[in-house]
Amino acid sequence: MLTRVYLDPPDYKQLGQLVDELQAGAIFIYPTASGYAYCCDALNAKAIEELCRIKHLDPKKKALSIACASLSQVSEYCKMNDRAFRFIKEHEANYTFILPASGSLPKVFKHRHEVGVRLAQHPLGQLLTEHLGHPIITSSLPSEGITEVEYLTNPELIDERFGHAVARILDVGELPLAPSTIVDCTDEPFEIVRLGHGRLDAEEPLLADR
């Protein structure tokens, strides 16, 4: 179902309904700084299993990603040393950080002992994670077989392609694709896994021992 969401100002009644649905296990397609993506409650194991089924993901082979409202929220669900904390604080936007998962996340995360982490940058993602009080799972829309990029950027076409599998598509208008830069922070020196919209110099001091 295509659901128009207005953010200026936010509709807190609608936001409360969306949070309730996430807690009940709903899967949405929602806006992020990288484009539209799947999301569900990161503490709802059944919702995570369903999202993995929809995306044909095996969490034993590929780390799942969560979106958090703040660094404080990240620290509740991931293990960070001072170096990782400082690095993430300086590179919040357009990055995904791979961190060791803590015991606060569902068992599905324990197969790989690590999790991808993003600080929610889009206003709706920020509101959802703040009002939910904990992270959401975030996972990009699959591009396999997509020959027209509009099926990943235009909410009406996203609904046509992916709407059958989710409870809602949270429509804030068209969004460009801007894949994040992925940095593995599980060991030092940190490693750039993928260069994306967030730019990083491989010689940046925080990536080396200092």
Image (tube, helix red, strand yellow):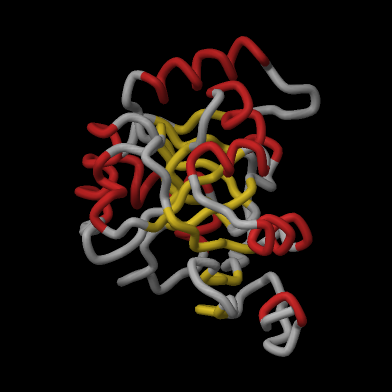
Q: Position of residue 49 (x, y in %)?
A: 22, 41
Who's the residue at 54% across and 45% down the image? 67
Who's the residue at 56% across and 14% down the image? 16
Foreground pick, 159 / 27? 27
Q: Is residue 115 left or right of residue 122?
A: left
Does the image show residue 112? yes
Who's the residue at 56% across and 24% down the image? 133
Q: Position of residue 41 (x, y in %)?
A: 41, 32
Who's the residue at 75% across and 55% down the image? 89
Q: Residue furthest top?
A: 13
Q: Quadrant of the C terminus?
A: bottom right
Q: Is residue 108 left or right of residue 202?
A: left
Q: Position of residue 69 (x, y in %)?
A: 64, 37
Q: Is residue 137 left or right of residue 194?
A: left
Foreground pick, 27 / 103? 103
Rendering quarter of residue 12: top right
Foreground pick, 31 / 65? 65
Q: Position of residue 66 (x, y in %)?
A: 48, 47
In this rendering, the answer to whether 172 lies above or below 115 is above
In this rendering, the answer to whether 129 lies above or below 61 is above
